[in-house]
Amino acid sequence: MRAEERSEISMLKKEKMNLLKIIDKKNEEKISLQSEVTKLRKTLAEEYLRYLSERDARKILIADLNELRYQREDMSLAQSPGIWGEDPVKLTVALKMARQDLARTQMELNTMKANFGDVVPRRDFEMQEKTNKDLQEQLDSLRDDYKEVCKEHEMLLQLHMSTLKERDQYHSELQEIQRTSTPRPDWAKCEDVVAGGPDRWHMLAEGKNSDQLVDVLLEEIGVGLLQEKDFFPGLGYEESIPPFLRFEGVVENKKPTKKDVINLLKDAWKERLAEEQKEKFQDFFLNFLERRFGPADAMAWAYTIFENIKLFRSNEVMSQFYAVLMGKWNESVYIKQKETVTQLLKEMTNVDSQNEGLLTMEQLSTVLKSTFPFKKEEKIQELMEAGGWHPSSSNADLLNYHSLFAEDEEGQSRPFVQQLWEQYLDEKDDYLQELKQELGLELREKVTLPKVREALMTIDPKLDKQTLNSYLSQAFQLPVTELPEEAEEKTEDIVIQLQTALERLQMADIRRMGPREQEPVS
């Protein structure tokens, strides 16, 4: 049974294969017939078109023949009976030739229509080509304008977002201030309390805000308390105590006047600047007092001066000396500021060709712009106003420039030099804030030395290598000689908290060396 089934299955498979072959053959025949039908349809269409053309030509010829027949009859009627007509054979030949010419002309006309049916005149083509070129140029221009507008739109969006953040921040600060603020104090009440009466109080309070007035009031109170003390308790010999205050026991309060302290500090600065081999500033201060008053009284004077400069924060000489003495500033900050003031005075003297001590406002503006090429126009304007310029002033008005650098008996600078100092502090804060933004880190995050180096070169491309290394040395508290080069791998291992680095840079003389390169803005 299985053998029969197998043979039957084999036969069915063979039959199936034969049927498949027959089907394939039929399909091929079908495809062949379809292609044949397509060709025949195409041929039929061509023949039909030719038939239409011949039919039109036949109708035209019949119409021409009828026209000639009518003309012949008209001519026959018009001839007189005595004149014989044209030769019929000649006319027949002429008609045949005319028909041939007509057919040839008709074919040429049809060919011309087929070949040049879509052709336009050259003049129209050139006009259209010129119009198209103009439109293409306008399109390119509009595309460029659109790209610029998109860039400006992105910049405005970023500016808008930053403005929104600032607005929210200011709003929060305003709410906090409104919640915690107290009524504005009536400073006129101090007139009868401060020694010297209203006149002295008005002199002390002139041009000062509330925070500065608090310092003035504390100084007035502190002066009385300081004069009442006859001795100061020694602070001991611990490492946290500055060297010039390390003493056990009590020391005498020398009770100098404010002017005496200021003169003493000025003498200390003069001796410090004249030193060839620099020692630590705190050690220098103690040695200076020992040379000035002797080893026996040096410690008493150290405590006395320290208490005075700690108290008089509103005095420029004392506050700057205190900041350097306690390590809040590097002494290079003070030295560089003095050098800047000296250089500015020298530039003004050079411009004063008549050596009269006078400059015009225009000359003052020119000197300021040449000495401080990176200051913005509004900063130059602030210095001009501090020097005595006002909107109603003329460029030809004369100014005694030596008066800009004068000091009162307490060592306080004139508003011009004070404004110059305040601008330096503001510019340093802006510089460090720009550095923080370029790093893109929070204050508590760690930052590596290569990142700080790269960020400094980005915000200040004109920074020379020596100045850059001094900034890095200050930030990471490494000697300049131990700073690794950019290509060294171990630079990634030198890390520090960003807040610490910024605080250390705040202590040093940090200033911009050149403008930051910015993308052009249309």
Image: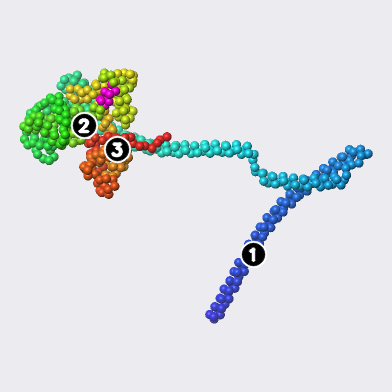
Task: Please give the label number shown on residue 335.
Answer: 2
- CA separation, marks 2 and 1? 107 Å
Tell me if 456 is positioned left or right of 271 in this view: right
User: Who comes first in sequence, dot 1 or dot 3?
Assistant: 1
Which one is closest to the eye, mark 2 or mark 1? Answer: 2
Query: Residue 40, image x and y in percent?
Result: 69, 58
Q: Which residue is mark 3?
A: 463
Q: Do residues under tags 1 and 3 come within 8 Å of each other at their CB atoms?
A: no
Three-letter code for the amino acid on which mark 2 is drawn: Ile
Whether residue 483 is situated above or below residue 285 in the rendered picture:
below
Task: Please give the label number shown on residue 29.
Answer: 1
Mark 1 nearby-residue class (10 Å; few <14, some 14–19, many ≥20): few
Position of the N terminus, as image quadrant, is bottom right
Three-letter code for the amino acid on which mark 1 is drawn: Glu
- CA separation, marks 1 and 3? 87 Å
Residue located at (31% from left, 40% from top)? 457
Q: Which residues are magenta?
A: 344-352
Mark 3 nearby-residue class (10 Å; few <14, some 14–19, many ≥20): some
Nearer to me, 166 or 489: 489
Query: Residue 120, image x and y in percent?
Result: 64, 40
Residue located at (45% from left, 39% from top)? 147
Query: Residue 97, image x and y in percent?
Result: 80, 46
Q: SS for tag 3?
A: loop
User: Who comes first in sequence, dot 3 or dot 2?
Assistant: 2
